[in-house]
Amino acid sequence: MSTEPEPGLRADEAVRAMLLLMPRLAARLKRTPIPERLRSFNLAPRHLSLLSYLLFDGPMVVGELATRLQVAPTTVSLMVSDLTKQGVLQRRSDPGDARRTIVDLTEDPETRAAIESWLAGGATAWRAAFEPLSPEERALFVRTIETYEAGASGD
């Protein structure tokens, strides 16, 4: 199988290529092992997104996480509460507004390292895929995947 991009794919050729590629990609993602340190936490894909935001963007308030995850703040609060009880996350009051709660990854070095290693493989693969592309091509790819996701989910 060639890894070189096909110049000028017709729409039906691109659809065929993606229909063949996506199941392999999904299968590969499912086979990505959860680090031993995190296995007992019963983490789901939605947790992966939440952990990714906190790892890459740092601590944030529940409302911001809800906006980014495109779910209700109560859903994020439940996820945060569950992961805090398990020692994956920590919460603290916002010093600027005590009504707001700031969420962050745990300070436990073993758990934090497990989260980082779990996400590192995907980040490395995406960096390799995006490196040869221009910023405009990267943006186009991200918008294309977002459009596909919205269309596939019926939004």
Image (cartoon, helix red, strand yellow):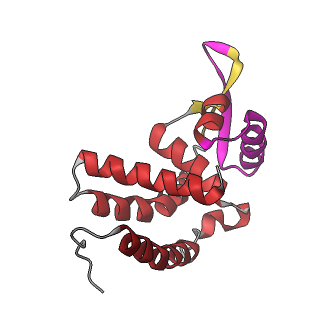
Q: Residue at x 55, y 56 (%)?
A: 149
Residue 77 lies, in percent from the top left, at 75, 37
Query: Is 13 rendered above or below residue 82?
Result: below
Q: Position of residue 107 (x, y in %)?
A: 57, 43
Q: Quadrant of residue 120?
A: bottom left
Residue 95 higher or lower than 70, as above or below: above
Magenta stretch: includes residue 4:
no
Q: Position of residue 108 (x, y in %)?
A: 59, 48
Q: Identify the image quadrant of residue 144.
A: bottom left
Horizontal relation, residue 105 to residue 124: left or right: right
The residue most toward the bottom is 1
In the image: residue 154, left or right of residue 126: right
Q: Is residue 105 visible?
A: no
| Residue 94 within the segment the image draws in magenta | yes
61 lies above or below 141: above
Residue 135 in view (yes/no): yes
Q: Give the position of the N terminus as an image quadrant.
A: bottom left
Q: Quadrant of residue 80?
A: top right
* Residue positioned 61% across, 36% down in the render: 65
Q: Position of residue 83 (x, y in %)?
A: 72, 48
* Image-based side of 74 in relation to 119, left or right: right
Magenta region: 69-97
Pick whichever, 22 or 84, lies toward us: 22
Q: Residue furthest top?
A: 96
Count of numbered badges drawn on the protein: 0
Compare residues 29 and 51 and report the one nearer the observer.
Answer: 29
Residue occupying image coordinates x 21% and y 70%: 7
> 106 or 9: which is nearer to us?
9
**Foreground residue, 1 or 121?**
1
